[in-house]
Amino acid sequence: MEVVRKLFPYLRKHLKYLAVGLLGMGVFTLLSLLPPLLLRYLVDEVVQPRSWELLVPVIVLIILVPSIGALVQFANTWIISLSGYRIIADIRKDMYGRIFDLSMRFHQDHASGLIVNRLMDDVNMLMRLITGDTVNIVIDLIVFIFSVSIVFSLSPLLAGVLFVTLALYVVAYRTFSGKIRSATTSYRFMHDRISERLQETVAGVRHVRIFNREPLENDRFLTQTRESLGHALTSNLNSVALGTVCNLIAGFGSAVLAALGAYYVLTGSLRYGDVLAINSYIWLALNPAIRLTNLAGQLTETFVSVRRVIEIIETDPEITSPPDAPVMQSGDGKVEFVDVHFSYVPETKLYDGLSLTVESGSTVALVGRTGCGKTTLTTLLMRYWDIGGGSIMIDGVDIRSVTLRSLRSLFGVVLQNPVVFDETLASNIAYGMPSATREQIVEAAKAAEIHEMATRLPDGYDTLIGTNGVKLSVGEKQRVSIARAILKDPVILIMDEATSALDSESEALIQKALSKVLVGRTSFVVAHRLSTITSADMIVVMDEGKIVETGTHEQLMAMPNGRYAHLYEELRGSVAGEHT
């Protein structure tokens, strides 16, 4: 009932069609229950008394009733399926939207393969529940109740034997259902791990080959598959065992019922038509009972998937817009970090009172060793995480007081590992500005120095660049990402080690383009390249979450025993080493 309660908001939107479908199921089921009664009437009231005048009407009814039932079933199946697909579409839409709303902490704790499995496989299981399992349950329950009622009205003793048989079904189900549930949960967990590993190895197939890791990956995949198969076989074996035990119980019960029925006919307690009807309704009662018992095992598996779907939908996002929050207006881009406190885990503070002011239109280079908190500063600015104390302001407005969409619309981002999609080159460039014209896309491409490359592609800007941009080099993907940011024309530009994957020639072209783009725009650059650092308006040197030095290149180099001067000499030495 808990599952139904949580799914009811989705069912309610389509309640009218579901009600029609349920009504149709009832009509179809009742029509399918009439033939045994018609057969009983045919034997006892037509054949034995030789009532020829009733033969044709009864035969017509025996043919007509199933025909009408088939038509009702067709219409009913279409209505239920249509409603089911619409419900699933609504659930998938909400799940997909919720995935983007959930915090970065959630995405760090849940592998992408696991999330995809829930969105696809588990929702498909839910689809089966709505359009298949539920329909079968309703039909079988109606058939079972009606059949047992008829058998009881004709012979209470035979009905009692039937109830004993059904009680044995319940015992069998309770014996096997827990084992099925446990094995299914374990299988789902292993299935998620396998999917995640497959996603990683397929995306990194070049690295797998260059390091000759194919045997290791094959062995790992085989081990995980075998473990997953073990859980699947355990679940399936218990489901099959449950069905087999139920079939044995049904066979034993049928034999007892047949013997008693024959005895009653021989003693004259029942007529031939009664026996035929009872026999038909006994099987009509037992078959749904068997199916319901088998279905109970399947439902145990299905409810595991349903709970996983509900878990995603009901997970509250950590980062939300305040109620009735205003829209962030596009301004000059002045940024202030005021006494900021932040930690990824409660026990370890990364920032403990960090403060920094960045004037509008200036370029800030964030410098420091790996893990010192450079990238975190930019993610906090875009409110991917919330700070534990202090405030972050853009043009004097606290970023927590405005809507998330309007806040993030101010930013353009270029990452070290650029994200590109299996779409056309033009679509990838226009990802942050879908309404861009082809002329605007081309201008952005020229600024990012990829126009010439685009003209060499088979279909130019309309060329599909493959999954994760497999048809492009790392440097080309980097420039696509830069073109995307240029086209968006953001108030604040964030470049996280954006040029580290480019060769010297490409970097020179990019630096030339960016020198025009950065003018008049607030920019944060997490950089390792000397050219990017030295040309910045302000350099911020960080160490273990603290700002230890700020100033221009010349000012910082003039500091005796300065941290920046030491880092600069290290960088210059590494660059010299690359060219020797």
Image (tube, grey):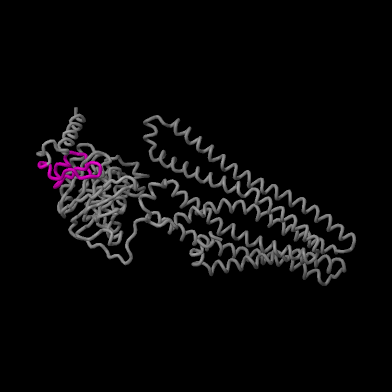
Q: Is residue 159 left or right of residue 18?
A: right
Q: Nearer the viewer, residue 404 or 291?
A: 404
In the displayed image of the protein, which residue is found farthest to the right? 267
Magenta stretch in the rendered image: 526-555
- Do we see residue 515 in this rendering? yes
Magenta run includes residue 551:
yes
The correct choice, above or below, for 476 with respect to 576 in the image is: below
Q: Assign the N terminus to one quadrant of the image.
A: bottom right
Residue 219 image offset from top left, x and y in percent: 48, 32
Q: Residue at x 28, y 41 (%)?
A: 371
Q: Quadrant of residue 398?
A: bottom left
In the displayed image of the protein, which residue is found farthest to the top? 580
Q: Residue at x 59, y 65 (%)?
A: 76
The correct choice, above or below, for 432 with respect to 45 in the image is: above
Residue 111 image offset from top left, x and y in percent: 42, 45
Residue 182 image offset from top left, x and y in percent: 57, 46
Q: Residue at x 15, y 54 (%)?
A: 359
- Do we see residue 441 in this rendering? no
The correct choice, above or below, for 492 with respect to 557 in the image is: below
Q: Is residue 237 left or right of residue 579?
A: right
The correct choice, above or below, for 99 with respect to 35 in the image is: above
Magenta run includes residue 578:
no
Q: Residue at x 70, y 56 (%)?
A: 287
Q: Quadrant of residue 577?
A: top left
Q: Is residue 145 left or right of residue 204?
A: right
Q: Assign the C terminus to one quadrant of the image.
A: top left
In the displayed image of the protein, which residue is found farthest to the bottom? 53
Q: Is residue 296 left or right of residue 371?
A: right
Q: How many marks?
A: 0
Residue 62 image offset from top left, x and y in percent: 74, 66
Q: Quadrant of residue 64?
A: bottom right
In the displayed image of the protein, which residue is found farthest to the front? 347
